[in-house]
Amino acid sequence: MYNHKNIETSIEILGNLVQYPVLGGESNTSIAGYITDYLKKNKISYSTVPNEKGDKMSIHCRIGPNADGGIILSGHTDVVPTEGQPWTKPDFEITRSNGRLYSRGTTDMKGFLACCLTMVPHLKKIPLSKPVYLAFSYDEEVGCLAGPTLIKHIKETYEEKPRFAIIGEPTSMKTIIAEKGVAFFKTQVYGQAAHSSQVRRSVSAIEEATYLTQWLLNKMDGFIAEGNIDNRFDPSYTTIHIGKIKGGTAVNIVADYCEFYWDVRNIPSDSIEKIERSFQEFCLERIREKKKSFPAFNIITTAEFPIVPGLDTPKTDEVVKLVNSFTGKESFETVAFASEAGQFSKEGFSAVLCGPGSMEQGHKADEYIEITEMNKCLHFLDELVSWCKNDKIK
């Protein structure tokens, strides 16, 4: 594939974007300011969707006519930390080497944002029959927190109805029609302290936590044993993972407190809500039993953030045919990670993932994106613009 005429512009924009080290959970006003300044420079009207505190904002805009059936190009502005990783190159500065662009966020997912912004001046000059929307969020890396309010604001802002949503997560420019949902929980166990020689005259929070974690792992194993499998995914079943546990003060003291963090990543046929309810019911059984002898005993489980729904777009959906016409491929795949795609789908948009770079390089030291991936994305966007101009699938 020949180099796109705007490849160097996209690399320059990517170099600007990665200089904003906005981590999930932190203020993104710096990078949001860069993006809105860029839109202003190109005379594009835009809307911002701030959080309550006003230190974070999502951005969306429409380029083209007030007409139904347009396409949303969606991405996030935050990245994951680099601390503790063995980087050999600057982590928030572009290093160009051997056809690769190194820096945190190059592949996840500022490469896609850079390609979208590169196309803005050209989109503005073309007489489109269908509009293109840009929708950039914050706090995706800590639970897709801004997705629902951004989507709601899009639906309230425009009189017309966008139809399709392409979430530009790194998929090596492959069309992704399904992904797992995800939820993170914190469980706190309150026991009763005592000398360890009196362990059965007290209640150990750590011991109770082991019963709870084993219940969760048995739940996962039960899905596998029952054949609740979806071979489109790898792994092909719903996973339940205990990621962190902390409790106790000394080896000879019965622990009066223990907490652990766990996550669920579900295939479409399993419900995170049902898993949580079943776990809460088991916890209630333990509470009722232990409170008979130890009134202060308790178990509290809270969600770290709202459940992120999975994506399960039918392979026959028009968005799949449309995006494949842009990529020039006829295939589609699935991924095990979660994104904002499921949130767009839940709100009625036909959604898929398709973006430059690979998650194999994301979240790691010396993260990079191949320049060829940026090139593919720009050609992809050319095809998208052509469709928005002519409204015909090749």
Image: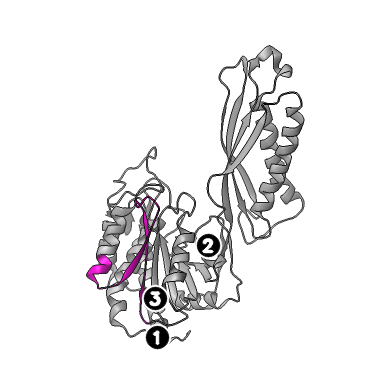
Dot 3 crowding, Cα within 10 Å, few <14, some 14–19, many 20+: many
Report the amino acid beneath label 1. Answer: Ser
Q: 281 and 101: which one is in front?
A: 281
Q: Look at mark 2 in the image and give the residue it sits on.
A: 343
Dot 2 crowding, Cα within 10 Å, few <14, some 14–19, many 20+: many
Relative to 79, residue 192 above or below: above
The image shows residue 383 at horizontal and vertical percentages of 40, 79
Report the amino acid beneath label 3. Answer: Val
The image shows residue 362 at horizontal and vertical percentages of 43, 52
Q: Is residue 388 visible?
A: yes
Q: Look at mark 3 in the image and give the residue it sits on.
A: 132
Tell me the CA gap for discs 2 and 1: 27 Å
Query: Is 222 positioned to the left or the right of 387 in the image?
Result: right
Residue at the image point whose x is 68% and y is 41% from the top? 216
Query: Is 19 positioned to the left or the right of 300 in the image?
Result: left
Q: Look at mark 1 in the image and give the residue it sits on.
A: 129
Dot 1 crowding, Cα within 10 Å, few <14, some 14–19, many 20+: many
Q: Which stretch is magenta? A: 38-65
Relative to 258, residue 354 above or below: below
The image shows residue 136 at horizontal and vertical percentages of 39, 62
Residue at the image point whose x is 39% and y is 40% from the top? 85
Q: 107 and 370: which one is in front?
A: 107
Tell me the CA gap for discs 2 and 3: 19 Å
